[in-house]
Amino acid sequence: MEAVLIKAKTISSAWSQLIHEIYEKGEEHKPDYKTMTKRVHATIYIEDVENLQVNPAVPFGANLIRKYKEELTEEYADWYVSLSDDDKRKFDYCYAKQLFRYGETAYNTVHANVSNLRPGSRRHVGVLWENEVHIPKYEDQPCWIAYKVELLNDTQVRIYLLYRSWDAFGGFPANIPAIVEGFKKVFREQNLAIKIESLIATGWDTHIYETDLQAVEKIFKNNDLCPMCKCITPKHSFISTTKGKACPECKRSM
């Protein structure tokens, strides 16, 4: 399996580069649930998590992104926990619950870590995987399994994420904006003047499902990566500049 390192200015650029790398270099893999994928091991560094979060080629709209952001909150965790076990809206794992009501004690890992931030510490870690719950299962385990918050200085943090399995095409562009907003909400609630300086995410098995490969192929038939920002851009919209061809956004910023 190919191991790739992606450095991106924005979330849009990170997603664009990631699906391009998997499409071009991915290893064909058949997991135990029989759905074929193309996969890589990926580490993705994103410099700016605030601007250009969603590329126009993402396979869903702003409403779904908004829904994911609403579901990655402490309020959603409490709603989820309040459901009866036989409620059809209750599935086997919920990221909000794992973050804010973890385990039998309903431990709030995010608030505990954020309330105790120390400059340079490598110990502000939260785990979403519960061994005794998830190891015996054969499906419905959390794909996102851990995070770390690193306080860089008085006003900035870096967020680290770890995925055991990650849907690059449909999962990544929803997950990252929601996770960013979830942490920002906690910072606001604790009256902390902290911004996310960057984010580094690692996916042990970062993949595109066979059912999505046709959509990805169609994207790269009509689009290409901008040589400057590395965002997926319609081929017909590139503009010639003294620095080479550029997407309209890069051209405006020159």
Image (tube, grey):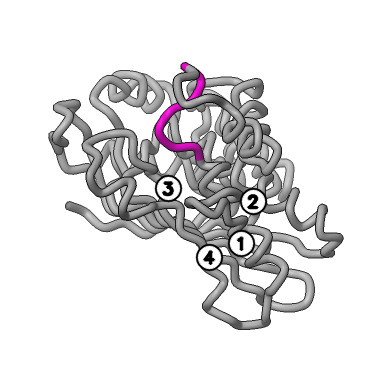
Judge depth for marks 3 and 1 and give the one in front.
3
Lower position in the chain sequence, tag 3 or tag 1: 3
Q: Position of residue 80 (x, y in %)?
A: 58, 32
Residue at 56% across / 59% down in the picture? 199
Lower position in the chain sequence, tag 4 or tag 1: 4
Q: Is residue 92 magenta?
A: yes
Lower position in the chain sequence, tag 2 or tag 4: 2
Q: Which residue is mark 3?
A: 144
- Give the alpha-carbon distance from disc 3 to disc 1, as whole Å: 18 Å
Q: Position of residue 76 (x, y in %)?
A: 65, 34
Judge depth for marks 4 and 1 and give the one in front.
4
Q: Taking 218 as reference, is 32 above or below it?
A: below
Q: Label for residue 49?
A: 2
- Give the alpha-carbon distance from disc 2 to disc 4, as whole Å: 16 Å
Give yes or no for contact between labels 1 and 2 (Cβ–Cβ under 8 Å).
Answer: yes
Q: Position of residue 111 (x, y in %)?
A: 68, 60
- Give the alpha-carbon distance from disc 4 to disc 3, as whole Å: 12 Å
Q: Which segment is the magenta one?
A: 88-94
Q: Which residue is mark 4?
A: 148
Q: Label for residue 198?
A: 1
Q: Taking 174 as reference, is 202 above or below it?
A: below
Residue 6 visible within the image: no
Residue at 38% across / 53% down in the picture? 130
Q: Position of residue 189 (x, y in %)?
A: 82, 53
Q: Amino acid at mark 4?
A: Lys
Lower position in the chain sequence, tag 2 or tag 3: 2
In this picture, residue 173 sits left or right of residue 254: left
Residue 198 visible within the image: yes
- Give the alpha-carbon distance from disc 4 to disc 1, as whole Å: 12 Å
Predominant secondary structure, magenta span: loop
Decide: few, some or many residues near mark 4? Use Cα within 10 Å; few <14, some 14-19, many ≥20.
Answer: many
Q: Which element is circle 1 on? A: strand
